[in-house]
Image: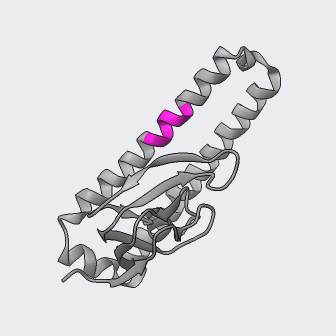
Amino acid sequence: MDKGKLVRFPAESVILEEGKVNKEMYKIISGNAEMYTGYGTPLESFLGILGKQSFFGEFGLLLGKPSIYTVIAYSEVTALKITENELSAFIVENHKNIVDIMRNMAGSMLTLKTQIDMLLKELQSSGKADDEKIRERMAQARQIMKNYALQTYVHSTDVYDRKG
């Protein structure tokens, strides 16, 4: 049996909330969930549907950072909850799941990149890409992302060094 605890979420309940630190990862055993960015705001964007064997929450568990998406139960969801204390045992007992976790993370990055590309195309087609304020904000956003990436790298190597 997988290392972790089975939990149930009723349909339409929030399982994971964007912007909040959640140090648990989930593996869906049954049911489906929806992923969003900007959930409940005018900037809400649907990212996709998660189903059986899908993982989510790895960002907070592995990096201790706030979630970059919200997960809502579409139907009743039964999931395996994996905490930081259970992660090592889960990996040893379920090493084949690591590829699923990596695929999930890669898929999330691809979806976010696609959305960024679509936003840039929209800005360019509206003629606003030449606007000085937009260029400044994009430069600020790039710097924020760079700083965040550097902090994440330092944090992840610190965690590896401590647990390694």
Task: Kindly indicate the quadrant of the structure image that contains residue 157.
Answer: bottom left
The reply to whether the magenta stretch includes residue 113 is yes
Q: Residue at x 37, y 78 (%)?
A: 82
Q: Quadrant of residue 6?
A: bottom left
Is 105 situated above or below 84? above
Identify the residue at horizontal 53%, vertical 29% (top origin). Answer: 117
**Which residue is pictured at 73% across the width and 38% down the height?**
140
Left or right of 135 on screen, residue 47: left
Q: Is residue 117 magenta?
A: no
**Residue 137, x across and y down, in percent:** 75, 34
Instruction: State the residue at coordinates (17%, 64%).
Output: 96
Please provide percent x and percent y for residue 27: 33, 69
| In the foreground, 34 or 57 | 34
Asked if residue 106 lies left or right of residue 38, the reply is: left
- Give residue 162's position: percent from left, percent from top: 43, 76
Query: What's the magenta bit mostly, secondary-structure-wise?
Result: helix
Quarter of the image that includes the C terminus: bottom left
**Nearest to the observer: residue 31 or residue 130:** 31
Q: Which quarter of the figure is the N terminus placed in? A: bottom left
Residue 83 appearing in the image: no
Residue 26, by quadrant, is bottom left
- In the image, the segment drawn in magenta is 111-116
Find the residue positioned furthest to the right: 133
Q: Is residue 126 above or below residue 147?
A: above
